[in-house]
Amino acid sequence: MTPMKEDYLKIIFELGGVQKKISNKQIALGLGVAAGSVTEMIAKLVAEKLVIHEPYAGISLTKQGLRFATQLVRKHRLWESFLVQKLNYGLQDVHPEAELLEHETSQRLANALDTFLEHPKYCPHGGVIPDSDGKYNDISHLSLADVKDDEKVTVERFIDNHELLVYLSGTGLHINDKIKGLHHDPFEGPIQVIRMIDQAKIDISYKAAHNIFVHY
Amino acid sequence: MTPMKEDYLKIIFELGGVQKKISNKQIALGLGVAAGSVTEMIAKLVAEKLVIHEPYAGISLTKQGLRFATQLVRKHRLWESFLVQKLNYGLQDVHPEAELLEHETSQRLANALDTFLEHPKYCPHGGVIPDSDGKYNDISHLSLADVKDDEKVTVERFIDNHELLVYLSGTGLHINDKIKGLHHDPFEGPIQVIRMIDQAKIDISYKAAHNIFVHY
DNA sequence: ATTAAGAGTTCGGACTGCCTAAAATTTATT
DNA sequence: AATAAATTTTAGGCAGTCCGAACTCTTAAT
Ligand SMILES: [Mn+2]
Ligand SMILES: [Mn+2]
Ligand SMILES: [Mn+2]
Ligand SMILES: [Mn+2]
């Protein structure tokens, strides 16, 4: 196992490769590598029985591949939690550090961190932290953009993207805020929401709304 | 900069390459790589002006190389301190984790860790932690093996070697213990010392005594 | 059905960092 | 001083990961 192989498994997981078949292009885009490099690496992962590849159709994780992927996600999100809770990092800044530390984290270290942090359930972006057996609860796929006017929902998680998080820190919208969808402007205009607790009106851009997931 | 280049600079530093010339063999032994690999890597570090190499004579750090080396040592020892103080690792177990984490640690992360740990001066083995400018205090090079009978000294640091640390945890000798050298057995036999605080008699093997440094 | 566009695969080539073995050089021993 | 031993350098290979370009396959448009 190498850092890059781990990152390939993780991106396949994050793109939904547990059930769905993921395309070469999605992976290439996600990792910022050339399509040819993806095909090559996938061939190696197939040889190690970590993914299944149906040529020209797509790639998905095996049970074994899923285990590696969830463990890496666990490490990533534990580090993110540590950086925010203990080292006072901002939400926007934790991802790049965690992206590196995750690969140098033994099982023992992950468990020790988990204990130190008192077994956090979610990373700072609201992502679920798998347990040491790789178990994790399912997450919402309902984006804020799909919430109907006047429906009340709770903010569950943000996609972990630097620009998005910087944008959101400007809006003042946070994980676990209970909000009511107020109004969808037409032509991909912003979505206005109101935060229940303080009745604050917040505008969320159309694009950002697609990267914020909520539940009832 | 790559992890291996960093490790090369660090081992040269630890072997005394700030003043002295360090031999190819010392580096090869220290890193567990072949002599040919050392020559090759040194050529690259020379090209980057991080070391000076006089063929067949030895290798030493430039000012620039020293900066990288001290920063890496800083990161290594901060991680060791974190693992012991916060995650309840044993002295013996921190080195391999720190050996990896050090390479994935940004300046910002190192400083945040330093603050979180309240600016520790020493790693768990008694090594000095350089500050963020790379400044560090000099260390003792007086080994316990060289202490004369009946002289009183304080244990300052241990060489960070797994077997040694496991051995020492068995003897009960700790950093900062004030001890009196009692008796050198002949023929590389153990050195008996007495701990002042509790008058405990402790036997230290000849070899271990060479890896324990003390000061008056 | 044919064609064109898009996506995926194959191939040749690059670069890093490691190895072993052979050659060169220095140091130690006789 | 001559020889042997140890050390260092050089040379040739290999594994991992990347790229770009050419080729193949699938899908969408005509
Ligand atoms: Mn990563
Ligand atoms: Mn996250
Ligand atoms: Mn290291
Ligand atoms: Mn140490």
Image (tube, coloured by chain):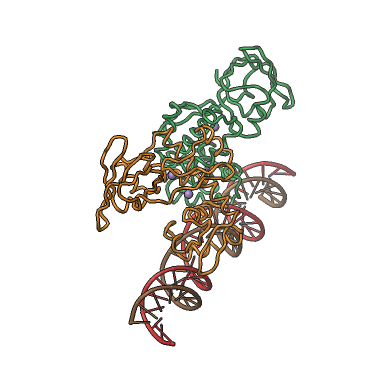
Chain colours: A orange, B green, C red, D brown
Seen in the picture, residue A35 relative to A4 is either above or below; the reply is: below
Q: Residue at (34%, 52%) from the top-left corner? A: A145
Q: Quadrant of residue A197?
A: top left
Q: Which residue lies furthest to the front in this view?
A: A150
Say which quadrant the C terminus of chain A sits in.
top left
In the image shown, does A79 or C24 lie closer to the viewer? A79
- Residue A107's x, y, as percent? 58, 41
**Is residue A212 left or right of A45 when viewed as pictured?**
left
Q: In which quarter of the image is ligand 4?
A: top right
Residue shown at the point (74%, 23%) measured from the top left: B186
Which of the two residues, B18 or B172, is positioned nearer the viewer here?
A: B172
C29 to C6, vertically: above or below:
above
Closer-to-camera residue (A199/A83) = A199
A124 displayed left or right of C24: left
Q: Is residue A108 left or right of residue B71?
A: right
How many numbered markers are drawn?
0
A184 left or right of B25? Answer: left
x and y percentages locating residue A1 in the rendered image: 58, 52
Q: B188 and B135: which one is in front? A: B135
Residue A207: x percent and y percent?
31, 53
The quarter of the picture where residue B25 lies is top right
Task: Name above or below for residue A53 compared with residue B47.
Answer: below
Instruction: Estimate the x, y position of residue B213 in percent, counting from the top left.
Output: 58, 25
